[in-house]
């Protein structure tokens, strides 16, 4: 029973896009690994950009910085 847990920021995630993501990840495991789609679990968790940090800064702050300051 495969279990996929995706953590994404919520921008652009509509219910329709979430359905597509779930279907496509399920299909990938079926095609590539022979896993049964009926027992494949896909969970999408949204994380606000203020609650996600990279390099000591929140994603919100990093997205508001000029490109040259991000690396």
Image (cartoon, rainbow, N blue to C red):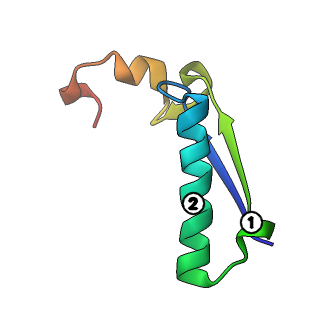
Q: CA distance from mark 1 to mark 2?
A: 9 Å
Badge 2 crowding class, 10 Å Cα cut-off, few under 14, some 14 to 19, many 20 or more, is some
Task: Classify 69 as above or below 8.
Answer: above
Instruction: From the viewer's side, name the closer residue of 2 and 18.
Output: 18
Task: Classify 47 as above or below 35.
Answer: above
Asked whether the residues under the numbered discs 1 and 2 touch, taking CB atoms below 8 Å apart as contact, a structural biologist would say yes
* Quadrant holding the C terminus: top left
* Quadrant holding the N terminus: bottom right
Label 1 sits on residue: 40
Residue beneath the point at 36% across and 22% down: 63
Instruction: From the viewer's side, name the closer residue of 3 and 54.
Output: 3
Residue beneath the point at 25% across and 26% down: 69
36 lies left or right of 25: right
Task: Classify 26 as above or below 67.
Answer: below
Label 2 sits on residue: 25
Q: Determine whether the residue tagged by mark 2 lies in a helix, strand or loop.
A: helix
67 lies left or right of 44: left
């Amino acid at each position: 029973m495969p279990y996929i847990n995706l953590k994404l920021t919520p921008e652009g995630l509509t219910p329709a896009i979430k359905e597509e993501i779930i279907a496509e990840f399920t299909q990938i495991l079926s095609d590539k690994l022979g896993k049964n789609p009926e027992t494949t679990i896909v969970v999408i968790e949204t994380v606000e950009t203020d609650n996600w940090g990279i390099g000591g800064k929140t994603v919100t702050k990093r997205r508001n910085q000029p490109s040259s300051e991000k690396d």
